[in-house]
Each structure stands twice: as structure tokens, then as C-alpha cells.
Image (spheres, helix red, strand yellow):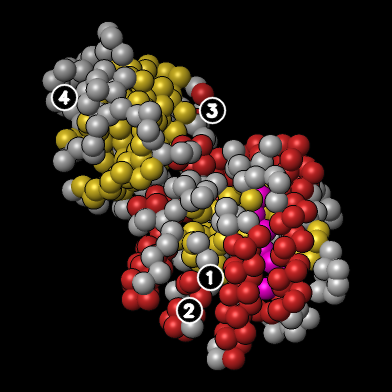
Amino acid sequence: MLFRSEPDVFRNWDNRIPEYIRLSDRLGIRIVGLWGGWSSKPPYKPELPQIELVKQLGLGWLTTTPAKFIEDGKRDYDETALRQGVRNFINEYGGHRPMIINLGNEPHGTGDRVKANVEAYRVLYDEIKKTDPTVPVVATSVEPNPEYFGLGYGKYCDAFDFHVYETPSGVRKNIRQYRELMKEHDVVKPIWSTELGLNSQGQTRHVVAVEVFKKTAAFFAEGGANMCWFGMLYPDKDGKSHGSSGDSHNLFDCRFNRYAPRLDAVAWYNAVNGVGRKKFVEEKTYTGEIKAFLFRDADGASMQMLWKEKGAADVVVPLAGAGKVDLIRIDGTRSELDAGRESVTLSIGEDPIMLLYQGGGALAAELAPAEMHWTSDKMTFGSKWDWRLPVKLAGGVSISLEVPPGWKRGDDLSLTAPALITAREVPFTITLKNDKRVFGELHRRFPAK
């Protein structure tokens, strides 16, 4: 069955939009949501809009079922319609794989409404497995709900699903609650989230991009199996929905149907391709609330995600045995470092960073302070540093930093932005080199002078 630890599925406001499917493919998503279903009347004709485009791009697909109408309280679909309809659906479209059936979507209500929903899940699951037992079935997307578990809905799926737009700790809380209910009712199965995101209206895209990295790490660290960020796009041909609640969820700016990638689209692209087929290995919280999450695949390709809850620190990150290291920030900027089979020196701040490398072993027990560091707008050198270092400023401008007369090793050195810089803050990136390799990068934003 296709239950892998990957950000592998994408769903949209309207899954019939071709641009959503094409952009999912470009982001690296391999399974897209489609709006499949069938008529409630004989002969229960099935439909699956955009399946031909999915085939053309070599993607897999996930669909909900008419159980979503039953969840809304409608009574169009009786047991015969559910059974014959899903059988027709699989026979018509089940030849293109991967194929996943997601039974419903965010049901509401209690009591008789829940009983009717669970009965629909039972009928569908039974008929799906009779028709083709290899088709994975994901439960409806509901919070960890004791009423559903008490009525046995956990028997009628191969994985559970929930949607949440809270903090990373809220994501982890939902998974822990699911684990408790699964154990209590003896239905231990993988946990998916086909919608993770942020209620982002009024938030900057920078805030959303930070959440993309953090929630990806949190979901898999807590034991999640497969996740999707929500959402992608919705047509706005007149440019009138910009800033609305719905628009603020979108990875792409939809004004005039241009679909321009936002910062969080860049972050999601790197999260998807950074995790890839890697499995979560371990996490640590170091002194100073620096958090590290390690992923690795069967071939030894590793990814670390790191950030500091508050403030910033310059540290040495041990990477025993690793060579080339790709450093990726949430805005997509990249640097290539060389660990020299030992370590890299980095600034760890509130914006998560991603490190991609081969091998590297387990996470280090501790992170040592960097030999060179800065506080406020001053920089302090350790005993082994050269007196001239390359510095990159905003816009790609490069300068060389030289010590003033009388400066001694161990003294502070003030950093002053050039007069031509008019921004309120200037990002400084100091590349750390020796005669063999680029072994670190320190990064800060300082007030412009």
C-alpha cells in the first residue's frame, strides 16, 4: 500500500482546475486530488474530471466519494448506489495508479448524523475491498473524535486523516490524540493529514513560509505518514479576492489568473523535495531552544531542519563523514558548503533552515558555539580567523571586511552598512572559508546606518 512518510499528496479548493494539477507537478507533488464520484441513480455512471491530464503528467491521484453528501445530511445515495457506484468507479478508472480513495471530508454533527456517516464508510470500504483489495482507503478527515471511534469507523479504512490549521504543537497534539484512540479501540493505522496549513489572513507570507517548514518537521516527527499543505490556488480573473481569507491560504497569487508563486510556495517546493522519500530519524532540542530534525533515505541522503525558537545563535553543527552540504533558506536562497567530514558553522535563527547532505550519522549530542560570532552589530573573532573576510549584502553586493588599525584578535569589530543602503535592515551574510573549503555561513539582519 502507498503509505510512505512523504509530503506526497495535494488537494485544492477546486480539483478540476488544470493549472492546479500542472503546478502540483512542478512543485514535485506526485499524487493530486481529483473530484471523482458517480450518479446516485442507475446506472450509477462514474466521473473523474482531469484524469487524462493526470495520466499525461504521470501523476497518481486521490479522490473523495459521495459519502461527503451523506456527511452533509443528504439522502440521495442509498446502499445500492454506494456499492454499485464505487464498483463502477474502480472498474472505469482504477487502471491508473497510484490511486487512493479518501472516504469523506470534514463531517460535522453528532448522534444519528455520525451513525449515518459511519454506515456509509462501512458500505464503501466493504465494496472497495471486494472490488479491488489493493486500493488504499483513507478515512474521512475528522478530528480525533471518540464518537466515530466508538462506532467502529476505524475498521473501515487503511489510514486516518485529519485537517488542522493550528500551531506545530497543535499538529502534534492531534496525532497524539489519534494514537491514544487507535490504541484504545485496537485499530492502529497510519495517520495522514490531507490539509495542513495556517489561518493566514492578515499574516505576511514570511510567517506562512516559516510555518511550512516547521509543520512539515512537526508532522513527521510525531509519526505522521503523509501530509498535504493547503491550498494551492483559485481563479481570480478580476483581481478582487486578494487578501481575503480564501486567497490568503493560497501558495500562488491568483490575481488576474497569473498564479505567481508566493514565498510559501517556494518554501513548500523545498519542503516537498527536501523530505522526498526520506524517513524521519530523530529530533533534538539543544541549549538555547535550538531544534533539529533529521530525515534520511535508504541510500543515506540526509536532511536536517533547524531553527531557534527565539533570537539567534552561531554554532558548529557536527556532520561526521559528510562532504558537500546544501544550505536552503525559506526564501529559496541556497549556499553550498563543505563539512570536510566534520562540521559546518551556521547562524541558527527563528527562520528554519534546511541542510541536505550525504551520510552524516546521528544528530550531535550538543552544538558548540562558533569560533566567530556576532551580537548586536559587532563581530568577535576567535584565534584562528583570517583578518579579511568576504561579506555579501542585500542585492548581491559584495564587500570585503577589513580590520581597523590597532585591532587585535579577540576584539570586537563593528559592522556598518554602506551609506547607499536605505533599507531599515540590511541582511549580512559572512561566508567562512579556509584554504580548503567553504565551511560555514553566518547570517544576520542589522539596522542600516
Q: Quadrant of residue 343?
A: top left
Identify the mark at residue 152; answer none if there is no mark: 2
Disc with the residue nearer the chain's start (4 vs 3): 4
**Viewer-side label of 3, 2:** 2
Disc with the residue nearer the chain's start (2 vs 4): 2
Query: According to the image, label 4 marks what residue?
Result: 382
- Secondary structure beneath dot 4 equals loop
Do callouts 2 and 1 mark residues in contact (Cβ within 8 Å)?
yes
* Mark 1: amino acid: Tyr
Where is residue 318 drawn, in percent x and y? 22, 31
Q: Residue furthest bottom?
A: 111
Q: Is residue 429 left or right of residue 273?
A: left
* Mark 4: amino acid: Gly
| Foreground of the two, 95 or 320 | 95
Where is residue 384 drawn, in percent x and y? 16, 17
Identify the mark at residue 156; answer none if there is no mark: 1
- How many marks the image carries: the answer is 4
Residue 350, visible in the rendered structure: yes
Quadrant including the C terminus? top left
Where is residue 104 drawn, in percent x and y? 63, 69
Identify the mark at residue 216; answer none if there is no mark: none
**Range of the magenta residues?**
61-68
- Secondary structure beneath dot 1 equals helix
Q: CA distance from mark 3 to mark 1?
A: 55 Å
Q: CA distance from mark 2 to mark 1?
A: 8 Å
Do callouts 4 and 1 mark residues in contact (Cβ within 8 Å)?
no
